[in-house]
Image (cartoon, rainbow, N blue to C red):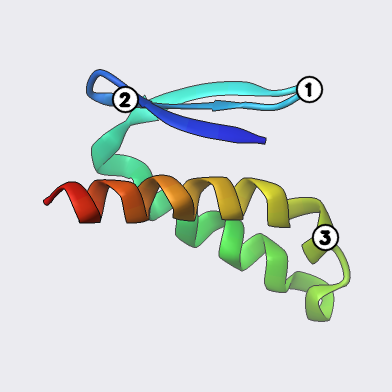
Amino acid sequence: MIARRDGGEILLEGEAYRSRFPIGDLGAWIDFYREMSGRMRGRYAHHYAPTLEALEAVEAEISADG
């Protein structure tokens, strides 16, 4: 899964999934994937981990840029 900034949006791309959303919604999407990862005592966390890691990396990049 790859996440990157594209103008004022985040582009999230995987083999079977592609989505765009405003940068301002990044925190909500990270929260969503964290919640999904924790469901069923983390049973499906490995499915969500690549997406969550990609989104968190973009969040760190944005924070570093100030």
- What residue is pinned by disc 3? 46
- What residue is pinned by disc 1? 15
Q: Amino acid at mark 3?
A: His
Give the CA distance from mark 2 to mark 3: 26 Å
Q: Earlier in the sequence, mark 1 or mark 3?
A: 1
Crowd around label 2: few <14 · some 14–19 · many ≥20 (10 Å): some
Q: Amino acid at mark 2?
A: Glu
Q: Find residue 18 and report its horizontal and vertical position in percent.
A: 62, 20
Q: Find residue 54 and report its horizontal and vertical position in percent.
A: 56, 46
Q: Is residue 21 left or right of residue 63?
A: right
Q: Amino acid at mark 1?
A: Glu
Q: Nearer the viewer, residue 30 or 39?
A: 30
Q: Quadrant of residue 23?
A: top left
Looking at the rendered image, the quarter that the N terminus falls into is top right
- What residue is pinned by disc 2? 9
Q: Is residue 14 above or below residue 58?
A: above
Q: Find residue 64 and report its horizontal and vertical position in percent.
A: 22, 54
Q: Secondary structure at mark 1?
A: loop
Residue 18 seen by the camera: yes
Q: Is residue 49 above or below residue 51?
A: below
Q: Quadrant of residue 34?
A: bottom right
Q: Earlier in the sequence, mark 2 or mark 3?
A: 2
Q: Secondary structure at mark 2?
A: strand
Q: Residue at x 78, y 22 (%)?
A: 15
Q: Earlier in the sequence, mark 1 or mark 2?
A: 2
Considering every residue shown, the one lying at the far bottom of the view is: 41
